[in-house]
Structure formats: C-alpha cells, structure tokens
Amino acid sequence: MRKPRSLVDNASAFLSSAVSAPLSFFSGGLSAGTKSTPEDVFSGDIDLTEDDVLEQDRGEEGEADDSAELMRRLRVLTIDPEDPQPEGVNARKRRQWEILALRTTAAHRRTTMKTAVAALLALTSVVIGQKQRPYTDNQETWLSKYGKQIDQPFSGPLSFSHLNYARCLEDESADFDIAVMGMPFDTGTTYRPGARFGPYAIRSGSRRQTRAYTLAWGRSPYEQGLKIIDCGDVPIVPFDNALAIDQIEVAYATLLGRPIPSVMSWKQGALLAKDGREHPRIVSMGGDHTIVLPILRALNKTYGPISIIHFDAHLDTWAGYPGAATEQSRITHGTFFYVANEEGLVSNSSIHAGIRCKLSGLGDIENDESVGFHFITSDDIDDYGVSAIIQRIKKRVGDTPVYLSLDIDVIDPGLAPGTGTPEAGGWTSREVKRIIRGLAGLNFVGVDVVEVAPAYDHAEITGTIAADIIHDILSLLVSPEPPKPPKLPGGWPRDEL
C-alpha cells in the first residue's frame, strides 16, 4: 500500500515546483512556440529603448503584468537567440527583440526568487507547526523490545559500584545499614594536594564492579540482607579548615544517628554503643587523612574511645608540623592521631600496619607509643607472613570497638602511584586484601580509604585498587568470620606466604 503523503511531503513538493516551474516555462516556451512571424508579435506601437528596460528593471511595480505580457510575446517567436540574423526581422525589430528578451529574463529572475522564498517560508511554518506523529501499535518501544534501561559498566550516574544514590544529609528519610560517603577534603596535606578528587576517582574505579560475588569471600556483600547505598559527598568548604572539620563531624554524626532498616544487621553494635542500640556503619572515601579526626569525634559520642587499625606508610602521630603557629594549624594529615589522643578519642590498643616512612629518630617511635600505638613494618610481611600479621592485629585490638583507616600509600607506589606522599617498598594490593579478609569478625564501627589523589595516577589504577579494597571492606563488614579458602576443582593444599 502506498504511504500517505504528509504535510511536510506536500510542502516540499510545492517548494520544488515553485522553483522549477518558471524556469522550465521560460526555457521550454522558447523552443515550443508556434510559427508566428515577428510582425505578429510586434504588432502595435512598440518602441523600446535600452534605458526603458533598465529603468523598468530597477522598479517593482507592475512586474507581474509586464512579465506576463513579455512572456506572451516571446512564446510565439521561433527566433533562435543565438542566430545573429533571424529570417524576416529587420535591424530595428531585432534590437527590440533583444531588449524584450533581456527585460523578460530579469523579470522572471525576480519572480522566481520571490516564489522560492515564499514557498520556503510556507514549508518552514508547516514543519514547525506540525505535531509529532504518535507511536502506532506496530512500533515497538525500547521497553518492549530490549527491556530495562540498564547501566553498562562504563555508563550511568556515577555512584560507588552503581549502588543506589541518595543525598542522605538533606534527605532525612534515607536509611541504610551501611553507607558509602565521600569526604573531598585535602587542605590538611603537608606535601602534594589533590585528594579532594579521591571520592570521584574511587567511584570511577568501581564502575566495573557490577558483579559482586568473589571467590575470595565466597559471597556478595550486597546479598546478605543489608541495605547498602551511596550517600554522596559532604559539601566541604575548601577555604577554612576549622569549618571543614566541623562539617565532616556534623555530617558523620548525622548519618550515624539514622535508624537502620534491616533486622539482620550488626547485633554486636548494640552492645558496644552507649545508647544500647544498633547504628549504621559508614565507609568514608577521602580526602586526605585529616578527615579521621572529626570522624573519631563523632564516633566517640556513640562508642567512647576507639581502637584504630591503621594501614599506612606513615605514623601520623607527630605532635605538630614545623611552623604551625595556631591551634588549627596543628591539625594536619600527619598529626590528627596525636590530637585525637589528647582529646581522649582513641584507646591504648591501636596498631599501625605497613610502616616504612623516614623518621627523625627513635623519639618518633616513643612518641607513637605514648599515643597508644604499636606498629608493623612493611618488611614484617617477608619475615613473618600474612597470617602472623593478622594475628598480631587481632590480638592488639581484641573485642573493643574498632575503626579501620587505610591510607592508599600503604600499597607500593609502583602499584598505586596516585597519592600525595608516596613511599617506596610498600605492600602489594593482594597482600593488603588478604590481611583485610583475615580481620573479619572484629567489632568494626567505621572504615575509611583515604589519600587517593588521581592527578598523580596512571590509567586509573590507584582508583581501581581503592575501589576494590572498599569492596573487600564491605564484605568485611557483613562477614562474621574470615572466609575459608574455596574448595575448587583441581585445587591443592595451600601454603601461607
């Protein structure tokens, strides 16, 4: 069946005919005329001069009538314009014919242009005014043909691992068992800034994590009956550190005070909390390490002093930075634990893991111990192995409330270059992930991954590692005990490193 012509089709045809018809009429008329003589054509008193033609060409009144009359006269001619001596035409008549042809051509050129412009305007009004054609029954929609509008690993809104996203600080109805939240703060750094872009880099590195089950854990953290969402970023002011630190504390305390929606959440939390009820747990994405001080202030109101498991190349327990002359300037990403100890926020059962930084001397170690820390060096993994490190950490913190803080520079900069204070000789990402798995079952009240600075990264490898570690952390928070090695076909007995 022939498709009906639309308004646009009709208007387009009208425009085409409006432009072509006068041209074909003029050109065709010269060749298809009758065998009239010049005397028939030029009967009457006609005496045109070249000035008359030029004057008429400059005017517009009477163009339609003039051109019609001139066209009538030319149509009956059999004269070939290329023939310099047409038969039966004297010199005067020949001159009048030439002038008449010139005048007719100019008149038709103007008429054709006006007709074309009018047709184009008509087509434009038709197209603009025409309503969109609705779908008919035989046209499939995306939903009926392809299904839901899913996010590919490389597409969609940027949330951690494509989790549901909520602005939890303003949406007081948003509830969760575990929240991922960004802390884009980096004005406490002593070397290279840029960690304010850490939350973005970690979320970007998590885009491929659309499948969450891992052989190492034997589970997916999102299928354990708990509600896990991305709560966005704290809108931290980057011009005033005192204000920024207060904003982080208020934001963390706000989320910590939310009721949890799940009946299968962390029962041990109620025994540890001062108010005897369960509180949600927050995975913070830094930001530089300074963010831990306001976080500990918020946690202290709920749990009291906290034991710290601190993965880092640096101690972060120094008393102050040279040149710090104000109380606020004492607080940096290398001094926050010292200040936290002064405020009574940390217990005397904390531990570092992965230490390898340069020191002023043994006095730094003595100061570190006074703050409440023991430490494990990066070289200890070669001397004692992963299992011994896990056991030492667990023995140190015991059954106290525990906060895990992981600086990405604990990993060797050859594997994770995107950080502000890189130190050579770090652990591999595989070693860190294995230690984290061995800590499952401890009383974690909060976790962070900090100091990711993507400006120094290459091919997103640091952001990808940080995102994968957070996936392990989420599995850590929902696992009651460390996972056992999977029994796979073709497997063999395993020796610890």
Image: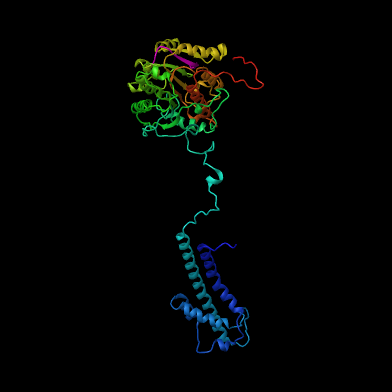
Residue 395, x across and y down, in percent: 47, 11
**Front position in the image: 243 or 142:** 142
Task: Report the span colored magenta.
Answer: 346-358
- What is the quadrant of residue 430 in the picture? top right
Residue at image position (56%, 46%) is: 145
Q: Split into 4 quadrants, where in the image is the C terminus?
A: top right
- Relative to residue 261, is residue 102 drawn left or right? right
- Vertical placement of 39 versus 54: above or below? below
Residue 12, x across and y down, in percent: 53, 64
Q: Is residue 113 magenta?
A: no
Q: Is residue 330 visible?
A: no
Residue 217, x across and y down, in percent: 55, 22
- Relative to residue 241, is residue 148 drawn left or right? right
- Relative to residue 489, is residue 231 drawn left or right? left
Residue 168, x across and y down, in percent: 39, 32
The colour scheme used here is rainbow
Looking at the image, how many numbered discs can be counted on the residues?
0
Q: Is residue 144 visible?
A: yes
Q: Residue furthest toward the left?
A: 326
- Vertical placement of 456 versus 57: above or below? above
- Relative to residue 203, is residue 346 drawn left or right? left
**Front position in the image: 92 or 145:** 145
**Front position in the image: 26 or 177:** 177
Residue at image position (45%, 63%) is: 125
Q: Split into 4 quadrants, where in the image is the N terminus?
A: bottom right
